[in-house]
Image: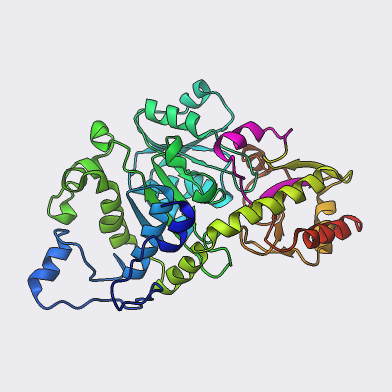
C-alpha cells in the first residue's frame, strides 16, 4: 500500500464486530487461564501480552503503523524521542564501546552521547557531516559500534548525505542509525538509502498537534549482526537473563528488536502510556496531508525571508542557492519539512526583539506541529552548550529556528513582517 493509505490503515485491522478505531487498552496486565501459557510468554516461546511495560496492544498497533511507513521489519514505541535514541544505541553498546555521531544533531542528543553515555563507559567522537569519507573514517576505532546522524538536523536544518554515512558505517562493520524526525517517512525513508535503524521523536510531526510526548525505534532487518558477532556479543552470545537464548540465533532478523523489548524495556521501562499512543495514532492518520502543507508554507516563508534586506541569511534546502539544495533534491525531492533557520542583521538582542514582537507565532520549546512557533536555540534548547560546541553543531549564536505551521501562509508572513518592522 501507498504511504497515504498506510497512515490510515496500517497497524490495526479490526475483525468482525471489533472497533474500527484503534482502542485504548488501558490495562497494566492481561489474564491467562493456566500457568503454562504465561510461562511460555516469559520464555519468549509464545507471542502475547502479559504486562504493559513489555508490550501493549495499543502501543504495538501504532508501532506497526510506523514500521510499515518506514519499510522496516519491527518497531518499538518509547516514552520520548530521547528515550528512542538512547535505546537504539544502548541496545548494541556497553561499557568500553565507542560511537561516532554527526555534530549536527539535536542538542539533547549531543549531550546524551557526549556527556551521559560517557558516564556509562561509552565514548563518542563527533564528526562534521560535511567532511569527506576519509575524514570521517579517522574517527573510527576498533571498538566503534555505531554511526549516528539526523536526516535534517535540528535546529540547523542541514541535510545529511545518508549514502555517504552508510558507506562509512558498513565499511567498518557497524550499523547506521538515522533520526528521521523532521523529514518523516512521508518525505524520506532512510532505509532506502542504506540506513539500518531509524528513530523518531513522535512528539513532532507524527503527532502533529503537541498532545503527547513519545519516540520510536524502527529496525530495517538489513544489518547482519552475526557477520560481526565479536563486536555485538549482546545479540550474538547467550543472554543469561533469558535462560541462555541467543537473540540472533533464536529470532533471526528480529533479534535486535526482540532484545530491545525483552531486555532493555524490561529493565529500563521507558514505555508510552496507551492513551499517548492513541493520540499519536490520530496524528499519524493525517501525516500525509499535513507534511506537504508544512513544506509549502515553509517554502513561501523561506523565500520571503530570503528577499528581506533585514535578514542576514536563511537556511532551507528548498532555496535553489542553498548549500543543501542538491542533497535535498536527492533525498527529499517532494519537500523537506516545515522547519527553517535564519539570522537577522544585528546582534543577539535583535533576534530577541524580533521574537518578542511576534503575535501569531508563539515562542515555545516545541517544534514541528500544526501551529507556527519560533525559538532561539542558543538562549533556550541548546543553552547548555558552549559557543564552541554551538558552532560545532552548526548553530550560530544568531540562529532563529522557525517551525512553520499549517495556518494560512499569508497570516504567518504578515506576522513576521510586522515583527521585522519593529526591530
Residue at coordinates 9% horizontally, 73% vertically from top-left?
35
Residue at coordinates 33% horizontally, 66% vertically from top-left?
13
**135 or 402: which is nearer to us?**
402
Q: Position of residue 25 (x, y in %)?
A: 34, 76
Q: 310 left or right of 407?
A: right
Q: 280 left or right of 62?
A: right
Q: Position of residue 390 (x, y in %)?
A: 65, 43
Q: Position of residue 213 (x, y in %)?
A: 50, 65
Q: Is residue 330 magenta?
A: yes
- Above or below: residue 161 compared with residue 316: above
**313 or 384: which is nearer to us?**
313
Q: Position of residue 125 (x, y in %)?
A: 49, 35
Which quadrant of the structure image shows residue 355?
bottom right
Which quadrant of the structure image shows residue 232?
top left
| Magenta span | 320-343
Which residue is situated farthest in the top direction here? 134
Amino acid at each position: 500500500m501507498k504511504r497515504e493509505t498506510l497512515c490510515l490503515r496500517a497497524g490495526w485491522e479490526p475483525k468482525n464486530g471489533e472497533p474500527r478505531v484503534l482502542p485504548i487498552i488501558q490495562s497494566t496486565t492481561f489474564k491467562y487461564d493456566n500457568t503454562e501459557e504465561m510461562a511460555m510468554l516469559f520464555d519468549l516461546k509464545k507471542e502475547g501480552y502479559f504486562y504493559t511495560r513489555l508490550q501493549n496492544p495499543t502501543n504495538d498497533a501504532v508501532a506497526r503503523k510506523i514500521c510499515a511507513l518506514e519499510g522496516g521489519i519491527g518497531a518499538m514505541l518509547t516514552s520520548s524521542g530521547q528515550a528512542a535514541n538512547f535505546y537504539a544505541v544502548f541496545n548494541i553498546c556497553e561499557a568500553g564501546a565507542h560511537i561516532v555521531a554527526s555534530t549536527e544533531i539535536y542538542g539533547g542528543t549531543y549531550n546524551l552521547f557526549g556527556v551521559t553515555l560517557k558516564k556509562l563507559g561509552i565514548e563518542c567522537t563527533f564528526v562534521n557531516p560535511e567532511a569527506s569519507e576519509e575524514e570521517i573514517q579517522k574517527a573510527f576505532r576498533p571498538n566503534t559500534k555505531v554511526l549516528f546522524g539526523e536526516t535534517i538536523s535540528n535546529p540547523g536544518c542541514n541535510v545529511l548525505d545518508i549514502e555517504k554515512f552508510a558507506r562509512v558505517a558498513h565499511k567498518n562493520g557497524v550499523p547506521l542509525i538515522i533520526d528521521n524526525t523532521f523529514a518523516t517517512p512521508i518525505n524520506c525513508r532512510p532505509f532506502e538509502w542504506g540506513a539500518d535503524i531509524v528513530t523518531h521523536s513522535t512528539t513532532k510531526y507524527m503527532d502533529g498537534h503537541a498532545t503527547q510526548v513519545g519516540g520510536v525505534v524502527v529496525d530495517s532487518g538489513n544489518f547482519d549482526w552475526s557477520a560481526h558477532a565479536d563486536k555485538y556479543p549482546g545479540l550474538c552470545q547467550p543472554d543469561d537473563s533469558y535462560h541462555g537464548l541467543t537473540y540472533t540465533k533464536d529470532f533471526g532478523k528480529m533479534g535486535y528488536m526482540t532484545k530491545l523489548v525483552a531486555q532493555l524495556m524490561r529493565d529500563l521501562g521507558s514505555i508510552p502510556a496507551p492513551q499517548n499512543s492513541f493520540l499519536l495514532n490520530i496524528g499519524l492518520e493525517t501525516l500525509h496531508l499535513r507534511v506537504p502543507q508544512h513544506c509549502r508554507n515553509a517554502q513561501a516563508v523561506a523565500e520571503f525571508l530570503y528577499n528581506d534586506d533585514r535578514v542576514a541569511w536563511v537556511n532551507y534546502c528548498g532555496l535553489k542557492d542553498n548549500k543543501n539544495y542538491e542533497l535535498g533534491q536527492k533525498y527529499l525531492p517532494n519537500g523537506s519539512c516545515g522547519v527553517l533557520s535564519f539570522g537577522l542583521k544585528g546582534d543577539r538582542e535583535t533576534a530577541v526583539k524580533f521574537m518578542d514582537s511576534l503575535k501569531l507565532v508563539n515562542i515555545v520549546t516545541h517544534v514541528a506541529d500544526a501551529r507556527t512557533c519560533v525559538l532561539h536555540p542558543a538562549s533556550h534548547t541548546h543553552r547548555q552548550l558552549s559557543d564552541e560546541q554551538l558552532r560545532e553543531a552548526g548553530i550560530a549564536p544568531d540562529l532563529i529556528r522557525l517551525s512553520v505551521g499549517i495556518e494560512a501562509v499569508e497570516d504567518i508572513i504578515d506576522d513576521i513582517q510586522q515583527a521585522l518592522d519593529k526591530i
